[in-house]
Structure formats: C-alpha cells, structure tokens
Amino acid sequence: MLSILRQYFPIRNMLFFLLEGCVIFSCFLLSTALLTVSSSYWFDLMLVLRILLITAILQTCLYYNDLYDFDVASQIPEVIIRLLQSLGVASILLAGVYFLFPLVIVDQKIYILSIFFIIFFIILWRVGYLQILNKGMFNHRIIILGSSTLAKDIYKKITRTLDCGYTVCAFIPDELDKDADKLPENLMVDQKDKTLCEISKTYNISKIIVAFKEKRGRFPTQELIQCRTEGIDVISGSSFYEMLTGKVLVREIEPSWLIFSKGFQKSRFRAGMKRMQDIILASILLTLLSPLLIVVAILIKIDSKGPVLFAQDRVGGGKKEYMMHKFRSMVQDAEKLTGPVWAGDNDKRITRVGRVIRKYRIDELPQLWEVLIGTMSLVGPRPERKYFTDQLEKEIPFYTERFNVKPGVTGWAQICYDYGATVEDAVEKLNYDLFYIKNMSFTLDMVILIKTVKTVLFGKGAR
C-alpha cells in the first residue's frame, strides 16, 4: 500500500497509471518506427518530449472522464465509449496546443496510426487489469474483529469498491452479539481452538482491523500483541476507515481517537503558506475570469429583477460571522415567505440564469474577493448560516471542530459528496471536513482544486 495524503492506495493502482502511460508512449513510438525510414528517432529528444506531451494530455483526459475510477469504468463497453470520448477531447486540446506551438506538432500519419494502436492496446490492457481486480489478485488479506456498525461499514466499502486493494477473509464477531447472524456466514470464524495469530497465519492475513462494539468485555490484548510482534498490522477500525474512504465517521469515533490520532498539525509557517497560496491563486483566478464575471452579471440583470450580487450571513473561522457574497441565482427576496431553508431539487425560487450558474458553481466566484481580503480561504469547509449551525451543533458530535479553520470556496466535502440539504447530509459532509482539517496540507489543497475543476466541468452535485 502507498500512503498519499493519509489515504492508502494499492501500489498496483499507481503502477497501472504509470504503465498505461508507457502503453500510450509506446504506441506513438511504434507508429514512428513503422512510418519513419530513418532510425534516428531513438535519439530524438524533441520527439520524446512531443510524445510525453501527448501522453500527459491524453491521461489527463482519461482521468477527467472517470477512466481511473473503476466503480464507473468497470465494464468494457463503458471503457470503449469513454476512451473514444477522451481521445476526441485530447485531439481538440492538442489542436489548440499545436496552433500556439507549431514546434511540438507530430506528423499527422503517425498520430492517426497511434490512435488505432492506442484503442487496441488500451482496451486489451484494461481487460487484463479488470480480470486482476475481479479476482482480487495482489489484494491485502484482512480480518475484521467485531460486529459493530463500523465493522459492517468497512466490509460494505471493501466489497463495493473494486480496486480498494483489500479482501476480507474472516469476521470474528463480539461475544454474545445478537446481531452477529447479520454478518456474512461464509466469513464467520469461531475462535474456539485457535488463537488469533494461528487464524491469521491460516488465512495469510496482513492486517487485523479492530472494530468491537464494546471494548470493556473480552479484549484480546495478548493475542493482538502476539500478532503485532509476528509482523501483522493491527489497526483500529476508525483509523482504517479513514485511510480507506478519505473521511471519518463522527457518529462512531470516540474523543480518545481524535486526541491520540495523527494530524491536526498547525503552525505559523503553515498558516502563512496557506495565506500566500490563497492570495496568489485568487488574484490569478479573478484576473482570468473577469470577462466571465462581467458576462454573468449582465445576464443576471437581464434575466430577473434585483441586484447582481446576493449577500448572506455565514459563520467562519473561530465562529466569527461575516457576509458572504454570491451571484444572485434566485428571485429577489426568495426567503421572504419561507425563511432560511436549504435549496432543494428543482427549487422554483431559482431563476433561469441561476440554474446554469449554480450547476457549474459560477455563482460562487465572487467569493474569490473574500479570499483576497482574508475572510475565507480557497480551500476549506463550506460555510453555513448561523441559523443552521446552531441546530447542527446540538445534533452532530464534533461539529464545532469545523470552525477551527477558515471556510473555503471549495473543499474536500464538496468534491466527495453532493449538495447537502438535511441533517444527515450535514453529518456526511462533516465526515469529510474533519478528514480535511486533520490532514490539511498544500498537496491536499492542490488535489482538491484539481478535483474541483472536474466537479465544475461536469456540473456534479449542484442544486
């Protein structure tokens, strides 16, 4: 397993991405060899750089078209359709690059032949890899101790995620657990005659996940120590779930887990770097997007009566209240009759222009000014209104922890979860927000910004 941003990814997934890049690169090199009389291409640095550029653009298109999400692209017909779409978009992007930089142009015949090679070899490559995933080859084999809700959630996540890299080989439930019969019978292990270490060796286990309902009863301390000294990883259910999903479960974790777990590192240097990052990126975005901002403002004014910008109270870092500005996407005085409510599907208060700018999150762009003046950050938990935060603090454990950082224009919860309009949605978003606050870093911010582009381009999760 490879640790990236406190999440663990199977090394085979990283190798798959790199090797697929090699396949694409090789297709272009093969086409060059077949269509070029001279053999000097082997030493042509410029040719190598041209092919690397094409490979980078194509793999970016594959990523943005969900071809590296095997929950989406797990069937060959779906892979073929998305691959053709990605090749089309990549060709358009390359046409733009070639227009601006003619020096990097690849011969048209070589490019066309390479596309045919790529379609054939990528499909063949992915058929083989999907077979590896379906058979669970090279998966880490684990035992789950306990039959808590957390244990069941871990099992469901593993069984529903094709490329998670784990296989649950056995369940050892809590003693006298009446709900144990709800667990998969074929995985239930009766620990009568064997120790936990012996069972682990029988199943070739590499990790033991501890997720008991109650730790006050029989807790196999000595057996777990023996397993640990034998080289088997022993991980708490909460920590494993965090690594597996990129979120925490606020209704399941104990205060002691938050106290002793790694993360939540803050310093003046980190804060200063994040502030510098916000100023630079917000300035660049405001400059580049200024024509779009002007066009949207004009369309809003033409479409419906009322001001272009809409100001609303929000609770920011340290529970300080401030006014957050957005492009107005609803009719004027939308809450005059209803009072503060979350937006719903097909909300009749949303205007025609508002529906478009909400879908692609364009209505949030004025908040870049709030990032510049320091009220908000570019990345962080999305701010809520005090009317809602007062309710949510009473109902959701650890909700106040999200006020330890500045709210953001985008955030980990926004790219991982759809729009929230209920208390349960707020709980789920807090699961992601706590993960972000716990693991804040420049790299994680960059990942969130890259994924935000994907979310915006495809209009996911907006209302």
Image: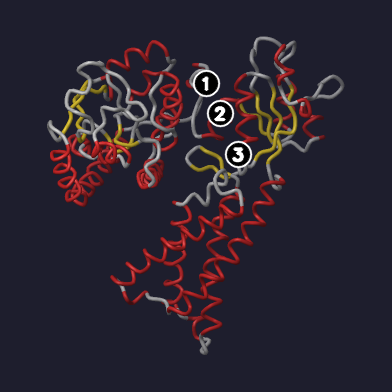
Q: Pointer 1 and pointer 2: residues touching (CB < 8 Å)?
A: yes
Q: Residues within 10 Å of mark 2 (few under 14, many from 20)?
A: many
Where residue 71 appears, as percent x and y from the top left, is 57, 43
Amino acid residing under circle 3: Thr
Task: Count neighbours of disc 3 (C-alpha within 10 A) and say few if under 14, some if 14 to 19, many if 20 or more.
Answer: some
Q: Which residue is mark 3?
A: 161
Direction from residue 100 to residue 69 in the image, left or right: right
Give the answer, above or below, for where 238 lies relative to 450: above
Q: CA distance from mark 1 to mark 2?
A: 8 Å
Question: Helix or strand or loop: what does disc 2 sit on?
Answer: helix
Q: Is residue 102 left or right of residue 165?
A: left
* Residue situated in front as seen by the camera: 71 or 8: 71
Q: Residue at x 48, y 74 (%)?
A: 112
Left or right of 69 in this view: 187: right
Where's the C terminus, which quadrant? top left
Which mark sits nearer the N-terminus, 1 or 2?
2
Relative depth, front residue between 351 and 374: 351
Q: Secondary structure at mark 3?
A: loop
Quadrant assignment, res 441: top left
Discs 1/3, front: 3
Q: Is residue 218 rendered to the left or right of residue 303?
A: right
Q: Position of residue 280 (x, y in %)?
A: 23, 46
Tag 2: amino acid: Ser
Residue 386 place in picture, x, y as percent: 27, 17
**Between discs 2 and 3, the one toward the N terminus:** 3
Which of the numbered marks, if any, corresponds to residue 257? 1
Per the image, label 1 sits on a secondary structure element best described as: helix
Q: Badges 1 and 3: C-beta atoms under 8 Å apart?
A: no
Closer to us: 416 or 329: 329
Q: Disc 2 vs disc 3: which is toward the camera?
A: 3
Question: Which residue corresponds to mark 2?
Answer: 239
The amino acid type of the residue labelled 1 equals: Trp
